[in-house]
Amino acid sequence: MTHLAHERNPSRVYVLASAAGRDDTPAWFGNLHANRDDLTVEFGTATASASVSAEVLKEPLRCQIFAKRAARYPGFATTGPAPRARYPSSR
């Protein structure tokens, strides 16, 4: 199990591959996309797998989701690489 930075709305979960601020993309991000149509998502005791898939977000949605996360958790925006870093994000 891997705990991930994420944002949710009623129909989607957005996962941010920030690698806790390191310059590299986390290994799980590659695994996610290698198996993008065979995923299971768990939140507490709730599990979803039947209609879960992954895609890399394009601009401007990627920036909007990151900004939403940073607004809720200000430390998220200030840790890690320079602000120009473009963390991959999936939904």
Image (cartoon, rainbow, N blue to C red):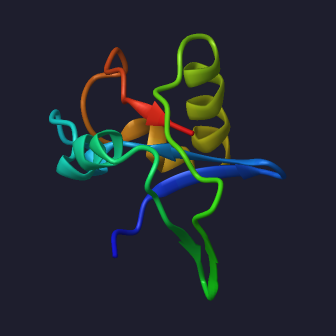
Residue at the image position 29 percent from the left and 51 percent from the top: 20
The C terminus, quarter of image: top right
- The foreground one among 87 and 31 is 31
**Horizontal side, residue 65 vs residue 25: left or right:** right
Placement of 42 over or under 19, stated as above or below: below
Residue at the image position 15 percent from the left and 36 percent from the top: 24
Residue at the image position 21 percent from the left and 46 percent from the top: 26
- x, y percentage for residue 2? 34, 69
Q: How many discs appear?
A: 0
- The foreground one among 68 and 35 is 35
Placement of 82 over or under 19, stated as above or below: above
**Horizontal side, residue 65 vs residue 5: left or right:** right
Placement of 74 over or under 57, stated as above or below: below
The N terminus, quarter of image: bottom left
- The foreground one among 53 and 26 is 53
**Horizontal side, residue 8 vs residue 80: left or right:** right
- x, y percentage for residue 90? 49, 37
- Give residue 62's quadrant in the image: top right
**Horizontal side, residue 3 vs residue 59: left or right:** left
Residue farthest bottom in this picture: 45
- The foreground one among 66 and 71 is 66
- x, y percentage for residue 3? 40, 68
- x, y percentage for residue 7? 64, 49
